[in-house]
Amino acid sequence: MAPILSKEKLPQKLRPEDAAKVVVQKARPFLDSLLKIVEVSIQTGGVVVDEAKTAMNNVGHWVDQCMHSSAQLLQALCCIDLEKFTRGPEKPALHSQLPVMFVIGLLVMMYSAFVFAYLPAAGLALNSQVSLVFHAFVFLTLASFAQAARTDPGNIPPGPEWRDRSRPPRKTHEQKRFSEEPRWCRKSEAFKPDRAHFCRAMNRVVLRMDHHCPWLGNTVGWANHKYFYLFLAYTSAACSLLGMNVLELLLHATLPALTTFLLIGTEALTFLLTSILVPFLLFHTWLIVRNMTTIEFCASFAKTQDEKPYDNPYDVGIFRNVSAVLGASPLVWHPPACLGQGV
C-alpha cells in the first residue's frame, strides 16, 4: 500500500508574490558578491590606469632624453650647429640643384636594379605581387617628393595688419626671447606669425618652419611638411623592401657572377640608404607626435643643456598632433594630397 501523506507534509502552492520573494532572497548573496567583484574591479582598474599613465609618461620622458642625447652626439661628432643648419645657408650656391638631381639619380638606380636585375634573377614577372608593391612605393615616393619640392611652405599673410609696426596683430602670442615685444622681422618688415621663422635660403619668413632641406631644394614648412614626411616614409619602405628581397635571393640562390655583382651593389646601396633614412624618419615621427618642429627642438635642446625645463605649448595630444600635419582623418594620412589642420 502507498503511504498516506498527512496534511502537514503536503506541498503548499505559493502565491506569485511569495515566490518572487523567495527567489530574491536566494539570489541576494549572489548579487552581493557580484557587486563586490564589480567594485573591486573598478578600484583595481583605476589603479591600473594611473599606473599606465605614469608608465607612459616615463617612457615619453625617456624617449625625449634619447632624442636630445642623440642630437648632442650628432653636434659633437659632425661639428655642426643645428640651429644654423636648419635655417639654411645665407647665400645658396649655384649648384643648389645638385642634391635634388642626386636624389632622383638614386631613385632611378634603385628602380633599374629592381626591374632589370632582381626580377629576372628571381624569375618574377613585372605584374607579380612584390613588383606591384614596390612600384606603388616608388610612385608614392616620387609623388611625395614632387609635392614637397614644388609646394610653397607658406608666407606671411597679405594685408596691412601684419605690416603696421605700431599695431601688432591679435592672432600672435609668441614674443621675443629677451623681451615681451611681438616678433617683428626687420628683413621682411612685418610681424612673424606664431611658429614662423626667417629662412636665409629663401630670404623670407616661412610659416611653421621646420628646416631648409637641400635635397628638396625647398624649405619644409606648414604647407609641405606632410609631403616631406611621406617622402621619408615611402623611400624607407621601398629601400627596405628591395634590400630584404635582394638579401634573401643572394642567400638562397646560385646566380651568375655579373648578376651577383649587381645585386651585391644594390644591397650595399639599399643598406646605406636605409641606415640613414630610418633614423631620420623616426626622429621626424617623434617630432610630429610631440607637435614640434626641428627649430623648436633646437630651442628645447638648448634649454635642456641649460638645465631649464621646456614646456611645449603646442602639444595637444598624440592624435591631434599627428592630425595637425597629416590630416584630420587617418584615411587621408597616407596619400600625398590632403594637408593637415595646423596648430
Image (spheres, grey):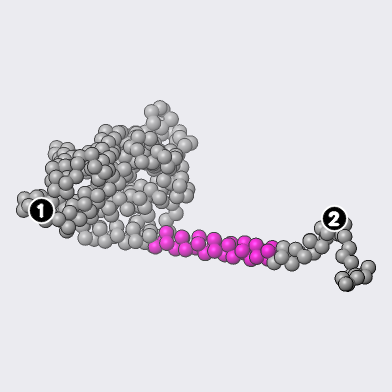
Residue 175: x %, y % from top left: 42, 45
Residue 271: image quadrant is: bottom left
Label at residue 81: none
Up-down: is 271 above or below 92? below
**In this picture, residue 279 sits left or right of residue 120:** right
Residue shown at 14%/45% (left/top)? 120
Residue shown at 29%/57% (left/top)? 71
Label at residue 16: 2
Residue 331 appears in the picture as rendered: yes
Q: Residue furthest top?
A: 159
Residue 123: x %, y % from top left: 16, 46
Instruction: Confirm whether the magenta stretch covers residue 37.
Output: yes
Which secondary structure, mark 1? loop
Q: Specify the amino acid type for callout 1.
A: Leu
| Magenta span: chief secondary structure | helix
Q: Name the residue under label 1.
A: 255
Residue 276: x %, y % from top left: 23, 53
- The number of callouts visible is 2
Residue 308: image quadrant is: bottom left
Which segment is the magenta one?
34-62
